Amino acid sequence: MSPDLHFRNAWIARNILPHEPTMRRFLARQLLPPGIDEEDVVQEVYGRLIEMPSLGDIRNPRSYMIGLARNIVLMHLRRARIVAIRSLEEMAETHFAADDPSPETQASDRQQLHLLAQAIASLDEPARSVFLLRAVDGLPYADIAHRLGLSENAVQKRHARALEQFMMLLGRDGNAPAHATPLQSQTCKASNDERA
Amino acid sequence: MMNEREASGDISRRAAELAVSFDAGSLSSADRIEAEAWLQRDIRHRGAFARAQAGLIHSRKAAAVSTFDTDRYSTTNDLSPVEVSVPDTHARIAPPTRRRFIALGGSAAAMAVIGIAAFGVTTIASTQAYATALGETRVIQLGEAARMTLNTDSRVLVKTQGRSHHVALEHGEALFEVVSGRGASVLVDTGTSVAGSTGGSFAVRKTQDMPLQVLVQSGDVSLSDGTTQSSKAIHLTANQRVIADLGTGNIVTPLSQDKVDHELEWRNGLLAFEDETLFDAAREFARYSSVSIEVSDPSVGQQTITGLFDARDPRGFAQSAALSLGMRVQNYPNAVRIEP
């Protein structure tokens, strides 16, 4: 991986991930056009973020993320030609509810570790074992495969699932999403074939 | 292309798989090209991928939870870290270099055309200076078989000839990782000493507040006196630290695996302290931030603290320290003071 990319990813881990729950709480209060869910917007926010030439210039990552999210929702609303004037007006006037942490307060290092530990503890087995052996002990996949009696491929797949679940919990402060598992298309298999 | 809009859950799934494959270094060139194309298709793909990669980096902080004894962390509030059971850790194996070097192969030109630097390699001129600001960490690839990670407030001059990299460390701290068996070598010249390796991972620290320090994480490192050009060199291996003291000469100390890991937590933007005095901790934090940590009197400064902290958050550290020592903090524009 290019060194700049690694630094960028580490910067995101430190300055953006902790604010994802706040951004999701903001999105939960917005009207989204049909076909666009919260996850779509979140992914697009990250996508926009990494297009910036210099992340280090962002003074207040939390506000910046919310701002990006708001703009993306507005853009989609316009595109969908939803003439819900009210929702656009409401968007413009959005201010943070009293229960949101103030901009100056970021979860302390210990609080973040606590959240992280909780997210990991919520993982099912054997996903959690794979996740920890990799994250804490840094074992090569071959070693993990040997220990758990699985193929390396299977271990990587489990790690990917565990990572997905971990991200989901982190992004929502440890709460599973209100509705069922994130939207997964029925035509998943078809799309995989197409991609080849 | 699909007609209907791809579901976000599918994207998250693919992004996680890609992040894991990338981290494992298990992508074939065909895989890489396909991944590149997938990333290019949709901004959400790129976003989800960056997010998943950040998630992987963040997951490594779990090492902090299982490394520290939670009893030492007792506070009056209920934020004590949750003990996470880590299976099978009876023997703590020295982790190999966590991030794999990915040799690019022939698709470099194709990627330049696509324009997304997801797999780019930074080409460096034969002599190049690198520097980091206060609180900044920077990773610089040195050819295909070596890498340098610069810590805060550091400056180096790198001269590369083929696979040999000569690094003049002007000030600061850096970790050097050299993949063995590739014919690569890294020589680090601090002015008074030269540390080199053709296969290993070692950190060199040259800062004003302490004597020169070389820490070996793995592999083999040779250390020689740079001034007298004598041929006498010390051979160092994993988990050894050398402190070059002008008075007593080089002192080689064996360290525990945990201690070595703590010393390198700065790569994750963290500082690990174990029974460190507030004085020393404050001095360490001063390397990363212009917000200084002060103590009201020497007796406070001698109090010790243990834990893992965000290197760029001195105020957070002061708060945590005060909390666990039953003290309080006073915040000032450019300082934070701990007092009884």
Image (cartoon, coloured by chain):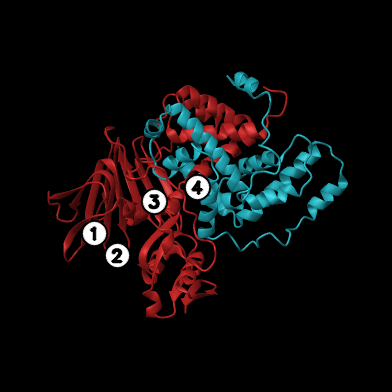
Chain colours: A cyan, B red
The span from disc 2 to disc 1 (Cα, nearest Å) is 9 Å
Q: Which residue is mark 2?
A: B210
Give the image location of residue B328, x and y in percent.
51, 75
State the mark number for residue B58. 4
Question: In the image, are marks 2 and 1 on the same chain?
Answer: yes
Q: Amino acid at mark 4?
A: His
Give the image location of residue B337, x and y in percent.
48, 75
Work out whether mark 3 precedes mark 4 in sequence or the reverse, and give the earlier one.
Answer: 4
Q: Which residue is mark 1?
A: B243
Quick one: SS at disc 3?
A: strand
Q: Nearer the viewer, mark 2 or mark 4?
A: 4
Q: Amino acid at mark 2?
A: Met
Work out whether mark 2 precedes mark 1 in sequence or the reverse, and give the earlier one.
Answer: 2
Give the image location of residue A56, x and y in percent.
54, 52
Q: Nearer the viewer, residue B98 or A151?
A: A151
Question: In the image, are marks 1 and 3 on the same chain?
Answer: yes
Work out whether mark 1 precedes mark 4 in sequence or the reverse, and give the earlier one.
Answer: 4
| Tag 2 and tag 1, C-beta contact below 8 Å | yes
**Residue B325 versus residue B310 in the image, above or below:** below
Quick one: SS at disc 1?
A: strand
State the mark number for residue B150. 3
Chain where mark 3 sits: B
Q: Amino acid at mark 1?
A: Ile
